[in-house]
Image (spheres, rainbow, N blue to C red):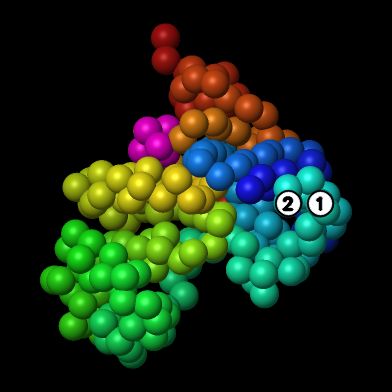
């Protein structure tokens, strides 16, 4: 499957955030988006997920125009947002069983590294990093064909970055993944193509040197 954004514009009031966003991704690839704080990466994901209405948008799914407001009901894009979204007073074990009815997917999560250590805790008692890891596992195991990951590495210890990267790579036979995180080397490790978002527009980036050229990384002499 192929998702193409030919144009997204988003203004908050009179303030333009996204003005010329053009990206595409298809099953089997992970695409990275880099950009400085406040440049609009999360806004772009929320527009594609359908929870923020774009000022103007032109999105295509397999060459047919697609309205992001239909995304949630069509279960096309699963989205890991920056902010936590889980009910705090449920036990992790019960939550996993509630979200996933089939035993195979439940087992993918129960047997993922580290989960046995916290499956009997309540969600609200998890550390921030553990909570983020749990949220990543839940979203990554959904059977939606597209995944959007907004900062999946943030707050998570380095050993688990490797686990997350392995899970991302293992999903690629069936999914297309859009990912952003300021742990840019981890993102770079799992992506096949990348964009930088700057001044409201996306530009393809082919090397980490270009990330500096476009003002995301410091220029090293
Ligand atoms: N609901 C809103 N109303 C008004 N302005 C908003 C709203 N949501 C986001 N913004 C503004 O839009 C800009 C882009 O925010 P966004 O969260 O998309 O940035 P980001 O690239 O994801 O940043 P970061 O790397 O810090 O997560 C910011 O200046 C933010 O303050």
Say which residue appears at 61% left-offset and 68% top-offset.
75
**In this view of the protein, which residue sits in the foreground, 141 or 50?**
141
Q: In the shown orientation, is residue 140 left or right of residue 46?
A: left
Categorize mark 2 by other alpha carbons within 10 Å: few (<14), some (14-19), many (20+).
some
Q: Residue furthest bottom?
A: 89
Mark-to-mark CA distance, 2 and 1: 5 Å
Relative image position of residue 215 (x, y in whole percent): 57, 27
User: Which SS does the magenta portion mostly show?
Assistant: helix
Q: Mark 1 points at which residue?
A: 64
Q: In the shown orientation, is residue 19 left or right of residue 163?
A: right
Relative image position of residue 221 (x, y in whole percent): 42, 9
**In this view of the protein, which residue sits in the foreground, 62 or 186?**
62
Report the span colored magenta.
186-190
Q: Name the residue under label 2.
A: 61
Say which residue appears at 52% left-offset and 25% top-offset.
211
The relative height of residue 170 versus residue 213 in the rendered view (above or below) is below
Q: In what element is the residue under mark 2?
A: strand
Q: In the shown orientation, is residue 160 left or right of residue 117?
A: right
Circles 2 and 1, Cβ within 8 Å, touching? The answer is yes
Asked whether 188 falls inside the magenta stretch, the response is: yes
Relative image position of residue 81 (x, y in whole percent): 51, 63
């Amino acid at each position: 499957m192929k998702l193409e954004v030919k144009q997204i514009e988003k203004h908050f009031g009179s303030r333009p955030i996204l003005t010329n966003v053009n990206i595409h991704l298809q099953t089997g690839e992970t695409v990275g988006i880099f950009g400085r704080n406040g440049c609009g990466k999360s806004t772009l994901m929320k527009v594609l997920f359908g929870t923020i209405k774009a000022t103007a948008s032109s999105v295509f799914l397999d060459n047919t125009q697609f309205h992001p407001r239909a995304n949630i009901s069509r279960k096309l894009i699963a989205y890991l947002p920056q902010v936590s979204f889980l009910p705090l007073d449920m036990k992790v074990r019960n939550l996993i069983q509630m979200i996933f009815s089939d035993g195979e997917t439940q087992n993918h999560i129960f047997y993922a590294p580290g989960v046995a250590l916290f499956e009997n805790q309540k969600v609200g008692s998890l550390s921030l990093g553990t909570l983020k890891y749990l949220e990543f596992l839940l979203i990554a195991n959904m059977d939606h064909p597209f995944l959007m990951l907004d900062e999946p590495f943030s707050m998570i210890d380095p050993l688990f970055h490797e686990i997350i990267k392995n899970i991302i790579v293992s999903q690629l036979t069936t999914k297309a993944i859009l990912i952003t995180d300021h742990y840019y080397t981890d993102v770079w490790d799992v992506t096949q193509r990348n964009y930088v978002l700057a001044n409201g527009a996306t530009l393809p980036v082919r090397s980490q040197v270009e990330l500096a050229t476009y003002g995301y990384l410091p220029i090293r002499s």
